[in-house]
Amino acid sequence: MRLGLTISRLAAAVVCNFAIRSSAEPSFDSKFSASDLSALQQLLQQYADKLAAADFQGAWSLLAPNAKVTFTNKLLGGTPETASTQAEFVAIYKKASFEGKLTQSLSKATLLSTSPFSVQLDGTVSTDKGPLPNTPATFLTKWVFNGDHPGPGKIVSVDDQIVSLASSTPSSNAQTSSPSSSPSTSQVPNQSPVKAAPAPSAATSAQSGGKIAPVQNPSPVKAAPVPSAATSAPSGGS
């Protein structure tokens, strides 16, 4: 029991820390006016109201056409999912909140001891409608469920808060591609053999054997001049 309570407290602390860090000072582009930001806030509020009523088609209609929605659910592994059609949009929300996958994930973390409980998702919305066309807005969505098992009609409120606003799509793509930081780790192994080439040479030879072989080949070349002592004799004769 104590272990379960400890785990639940730790998990709750992680969620709270994530909420505090995500809801820090918004980084808005200075070229957007206050009226533009206010209009976008109203758009997200309407969007949140539609989601709270489980009206996914209505929420999508606020963003379409040519809308792209990318969500990262921290509690379901943190894998970004992008919806560019209404079907994909509905599927993401149903998978995240209505089909029990989120409940199972929370149950493993023993977060269901408190009711109501909240779930947070990072999201990036880019829409052609509204005062800021083709402008991705990164927001934090907080789901508040009433009950231990979320299901249709169990959502109490959905609170969307903009945490950043980009003026061009490439910037948002750069943010969403942040998980691609893994290639940077691939560069670290390339540097470590350079520092300690003799020790891991056997292991690295499988990867860069072509590079290590030329290094070992010169050593026989140096061994070959050893017989050149015979040639040094004629030089001595001269």
Image: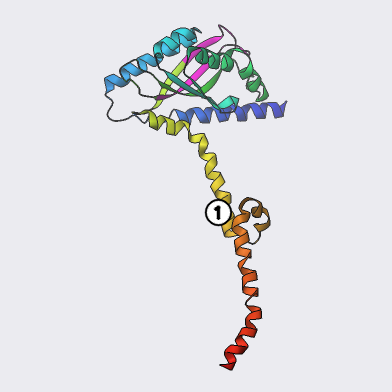
Q: Is residue 64 left or right of residue 187?
A: left
For mark 1, does the 10 Å Cα neighbourhood hold few (<14), some (14 to 19), or many (20 or more) residues? few
Q: Residue placed farthest to the bottom in the image? A: 237
Residue at the image point whose x is 67% and y is 53% from the top: 203
Residue 197 visible in the snapshot: no
Q: Is residue 131 magenta?
A: no
In the image, 217 versus 65, the foreground residue is 217
- Which three-letter amino acid code belongs to the residue tagged 1? Gln
**Range shown magenta:** 137-158
Considering the numbered disc 1 on the image, is that residue within a helix, a strand or a loop? helix
- Quarter containing the C terminus: bottom right
- Relative to 224, does residue 210 appear above or below in the rendering? above
Is 152 contained in the magenta span? yes
Place of residue 182 in the rendered image (x, y in percent of width and height, measured from the top left) = 55, 40
Q: Which residue is mark 1?
A: 191
Q: Is residue 91 visible?
A: yes
Above or below, 44 against 191 in this view is above
Name the foreground residue: 46 vs 23.
46
Q: Position of residue 142 (x, y in %)?
A: 49, 19
In the rendered image, the residue lying farthest to the right is 1
Tell whether 202 sits left or right of 63.
right
